[in-house]
């Protein structure tokens, strides 16, 4: 075995070990509920918003659930400020994921990704901004997966960042409003928050299904 080959194998082994460690941490050490997370964030006082944004920025690298963090943001800062801080953190986190994917390269991924992931990648290659925006509107599609696929599909960074910023606004508000409603304790507000959350979840999926049908009819 050549020295360069051994070095490459060692590098991938280190990456695998690091990924395994991160996944273990996310499933054991970081297993907290939204209310506990809210208390921990608020313990930083005036620095709480900064800490929250920083956590959201690095969240994709530690595989922490975005939904729990968003709800915690609503619990900690309310619907409006929680939405603002989450949008900032989520956009920065997506940009970080995009950069990491670009840095690592896409040769290996192109060889292993198939099915729906490959389909999404192909769509992004044709119209990056539109599809990133569309997929950001749809909460059932993994947030971080879209960032990585966009990078591998060579979507322009500015198009990716802008589409992400715009596309996450509705869903982010829905999660933060849901979280903040539990703090109020008002049943009417909680019901309204649940209704808003359901609408923000169902409408994008419905629009996407209609778009797919239209595309099929046009072909």
Image (tube, grey):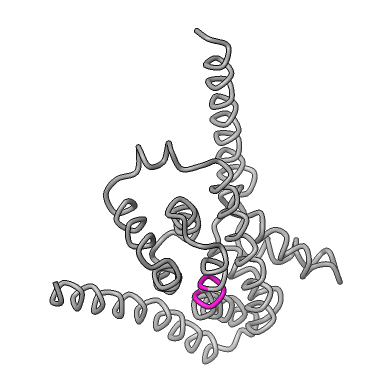
Residue 50: x %, y % from top left:
78, 66
Residue 206: x %, y % from top left:
29, 79
Query: Image check: 54 left or right of 191?
Result: right
Query: Image check: 120 left or right of 9?
Result: left
The relative height of residue 64 versus residue 37 in the rendered view (above or below) is above
Q: Quadrant of residue 199?
A: bottom left
Read off the magenta span. 163-167
In this rendered view, identify the residue nearer to me: 116 or 33: 116
In this rendered view, identify the residue nearer to me: 68 or 53: 53
Kindly identify the residue that appears in the image at 59 percent across and 79 percent down: 182
Q: Residue furthest right?
A: 46
Kindly identify the residue that appears in the image at 59 percent across and 75 percent down: 179
Kindly identify the residue that appears in the image at 26 percent across and 49 percent down: 115
Residue 38: x %, y % from top left:
70, 66
Magenta-colored segment: predominant secondary structure: helix
Q: Quadrant of residue 162?
A: bottom right
Query: Image check: 209 left or right of 181?
Result: left
Residue 212: x %, y % from top left:
23, 72
In this rendered view, identify the residue nearer to me: 31 or 125: 125
Q: Residue 57 lies in magenta, yes or no?
A: no
In this rendered view, identify the residue nearer to me: 87 or 134: 134
Q: Residue furthest top?
A: 1
Q: Residue 166 lies in magenta, yes or no?
A: yes
The relative height of residue 63 versus residue 197 in the rendered view (above or below) is above
* Quadrant position of the C terminus in the picture: bottom left
The relative height of residue 105 versus residue 162 in the rendered view (above or below) is above
Kindly identify the residue that appears in the image at 64 percent across and 71 percent down: 86
Q: How many marks?
A: 0
């Amino acid at each position: 075995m050549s020295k360069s080959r051994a070095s490459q194998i060692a590098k991938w082994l280190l990456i695998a070990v690091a990924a395994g460690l991160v996944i273990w941490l996310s499933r054991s050490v970081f297993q907290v509920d939204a209310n506990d997370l809210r208390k921990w964030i608020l313990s930083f006082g005036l620095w709480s918003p900064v800490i929250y944004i920083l956590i959201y920025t690095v969240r994709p690298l530690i595989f922490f659930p975005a939904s729990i963090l968003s709800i915690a943001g609503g619990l900690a800062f309310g619907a409006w400020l929680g939405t603002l801080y989450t949008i900032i953190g989520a956009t920065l986190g997506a940009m970080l994921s995009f950069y990491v994917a670009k840095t690592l390269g896409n040769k290996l991924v192109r060889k292993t990704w198939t099915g729906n992931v490959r389909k999404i990648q192909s769509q992004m290659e044709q119209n990056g901004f539109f599809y990133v925006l569309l997929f950001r509107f749809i909460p059932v599609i993994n947030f971080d997966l879209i960032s990585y696929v966009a990078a591998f599909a060579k979507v322009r960074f500015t198009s990716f960042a802008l589409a992400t910023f715009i596309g996450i606004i509705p869903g982010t508000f829905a999660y933060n409003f849901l979280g903040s409603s539990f703090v109020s304790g008002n049943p009417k507000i909680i019901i309204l928050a649940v209704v808003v959350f359901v609408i923000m979840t169902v409408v994008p999926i419905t629009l996407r299904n209609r778009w797919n049908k239209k595309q099929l009819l046009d072909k």
